[in-house]
Image (cartoon, helix red, strand yellow):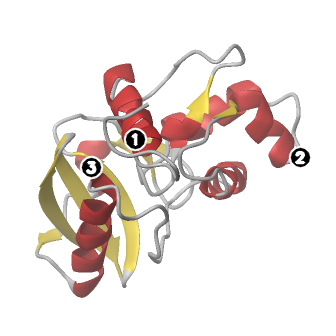
Amino acid sequence: MYQYFMDSPLGRLRLVENEGYIKEISQADLPAARLNSEGKIIKATETFVEAVTEKTESLEVAERQLREYFAGIRKSFDLLLKPDGTAFFQSVWKALRDIPYGETRTYGDIAKAVGKPKAARAVGMANHHNPIMIVIPCHRVIGAKGQLVGYAGGLDVKQRLLDLEANHTAGKTAGKE
């Protein structure tokens, strides 16, 4: 398992890969609970304690794609992902990847998309445990009334990601409404 740290407009990000698959993209300075491969919650500090700090080819590709995203060039990612989580969490994370760049969905929308229309709270829990921020875009999920709610990196970071995408959506130029 390998990890690499990159500077970004959001601060320092930690990128982790194992056997060519991206396992985590997170804010390096924020401790968070993660899931192990059996779906059990563990502390982030225990998650990748044996990771070697080295930029592998997979991590280099992930870094390049993230830089393109932050520059407004990249609207979708082409990375091999393998986040650890339960089958339900996996289904939610897959549904999140279907939310188009620059758009949002509610927790209820995602619950319906995964065939569990009454599971909006469980969708929130899956978002909370999303180990691959930005690429699995949990920042695009908002409350039922359009309000910003729940983001592990803080609502200010969620708003910054939504603003970045809004500023680079087709028909708009950065800084123009």
Q: Mark number for residue 158? A: none
Q: Is residue 24 left or right of residue 141?
A: left
Q: Is residue 81 above or below residue 83?
A: below
Quadrant assignment for the C terminus: top left
- Tell me the crowding category of disc 3: few under 14, some 14 to 19, or many 20 or more residues within 10 angstroms, Cα based: few
Quadrant including the N terminus: bottom left
Estimate the x, y position of residue 164 in percent, counting from the top left.
36, 41
Q: Quadrant of residue 98?
A: bottom right
**Amino acid type, mark 2:** Gly
Q: Amino acid at mark 1?
A: Asn
Q: Nearer the viewer, mark 1 or mark 2?
A: 1
**Relative to residue 137, is residue 20 drawn left or right?**
left
Q: Residue at x 53, y 41 (%)?
A: 138
Q: CA distance from mark 1 to mark 3?
A: 37 Å
Q: Which callout, 3 or 2, points to the residue nearer the camera?
A: 2
Q: Nearer the viewer, mark 1 or mark 3?
A: 1
Whole-percent x, y for residue 121 in the image: 70, 25
Question: Which residue occupies 24% across, 68% down?
Answer: 63
Circle 1 sits in a helix, a strand or a loop, which is it?
Answer: helix
Amino acid beneath label 3: Glu
Q: How many marks?
A: 3
Residue 147 shows up from this direction: yes
Asked whether 104 or 25 is in front, the reply is: 104
Query: Which residue is the site of mark 3?
Result: 46
Q: In the picture provided, is 136 more to the left or to the right than 68?
A: right
Describe residue 26's horizontal placement relative to residue 131 as left or right: left
Question: For mark 1, what is the residue?
Answer: 167
Q: Residue placed at 49% from the left, 37% from the top? A: 139
